[in-house]
Amino acid sequence: YQRRVRGCHIQCYGGPAHLTALAQQVTTVLAAMRFYSDPERPANELLVPYIELAGRMGWDPYIVRRELRELDRRVVPGFKTSVMVEFKDLSFHVHAPGNLNDDEIDEVTDYLYNRVIAQKNSEIRRLRELHSSLLSVATSTHYDAACEVDPERDAALKQKILEYFTETAAEDRESDWEWSKPALPPAHILSVVQRDIRAFIHKYSDLPLRGRVVARILQGIPSPNYPASSWGRVRQYWRKHLDVDFDWMVRCASEEIANHRLGGRF
C-alpha cells in the first residue's frame, strides 16, 4: 500500500462560469461535477474524492491525480484568473493486482464475453417478440382501434406482455434463438465510417476510449461516462452513423484504437 491523499479541493477564482469552462476542457472535472457537486458549497468550488472517482470511472488514479495537479497551470480562454488546487485527507491506497495466471485470465475473459453476447441476444429476441406481438394486434388506422374493443386481441396482447415480464432466466438460456445481423452498407459508406472513427480517436486520444464507447457515440447512445447532455453537442460525431451495424463499428473502432496506441499510421 501507499500513503496518498484522497481528496482534491478545486476553487476557480473566476466564479462558476470559470469552473464550467474548465469542465468542458478537462474530463476529470466534468465527471467530478456530475457526481460530486454539492449545493451547500460555493458554486465555484468542488471537492473531489479522486481515488473514488477513478474507481467509479475505471480510470488510473495516478493519471487522474496528475491531471488534477496540472489544473493550476491550465489556461482557460476568457478567464485571466487561475485555479487553486489543494490535496487533503491523508489515506492509504491499496492496490491488489490479483494472482490469476494467463490461462485463468483467458477463461474468465471468455466466460464474460460469452455471457454478454448471450444476454444481448436474449434482450434482442425478447424485444422482437414483443414487437411482433404488437404488430399482430395493431390496426391500420387509429379510427379502427377507437371504434370498439376486440376482446380476442386484447386478451392476446395481455398474454404476450405477461409472458415478456415473467420469462425466467433459465427459460431464456435454454432458447437457441439467434438473430440475423443486418447487411453492411456498401464499401464506400464503410470507408467514410472508418475515416470518421479514425478522426474521432485522433481528436479525443486523451480520453480512455474503447471500441464500444466510440460506437455508442456515433450512434447517439448515452452512458454515465459519456452523457448525451455533453456529447450531444458534438454534432460532428453524435448520432452520425445510425444506419451502420453496431457490432461492426465496435470491431472497427477497437482495431483503430489499437493501431493508434501502437503508433500505427491512420
Image: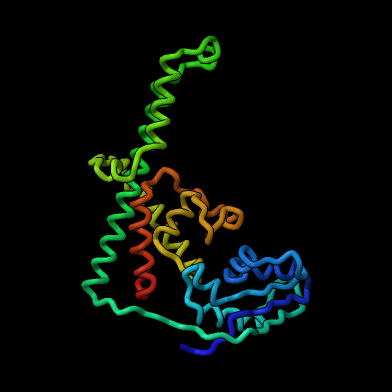
- Which percent across, then down, holds residue 172? 30, 42
Residue at screen point 69% across, 67% down: 21
Front position in the image: 32 or 174: 174
Front position in the image: 48 or 230: 48
Q: Residue furthest left?
A: 103
Residue at screen point 30% across, 55% down: 115
Front position in the image: 1 or 221: 1
Look at the image and name its color scheme. Answer: rainbow
Front position in the image: 266 or 28: 28
Q: Residue furthest top?
A: 147
Q: Is residue 125 visible?
A: yes
Residue at screen point 39% across, 28% down: 160
User: In this picture, is 247 found above or below 211?
Assistant: above
- Which percent across, then down, holds residue 228? 57, 53
- Which percent across, then down, holds residue 69? 61, 83
Count the numbered circles shown.
0
The quarter holding residue 53 reads bottom right
Where, quadrant-wise, is the C terminus in this rendering?
bottom left
- Which percent across, then down, holds residue 84? 71, 81
Residue at screen point 61% across, 54% down: 229
Q: Is residue 186 visible?
A: no
The quarter holding residue 263 reads bottom left
User: In this picture, is 96 found above or below 107?
Assistant: below
Asked if residue 4 lies left or right of residue 100, the reply is right
Asked if residue 133 lies left or right of residue 17, the reply is left
User: In this picture, is 5 found above or below 119?
Assistant: below
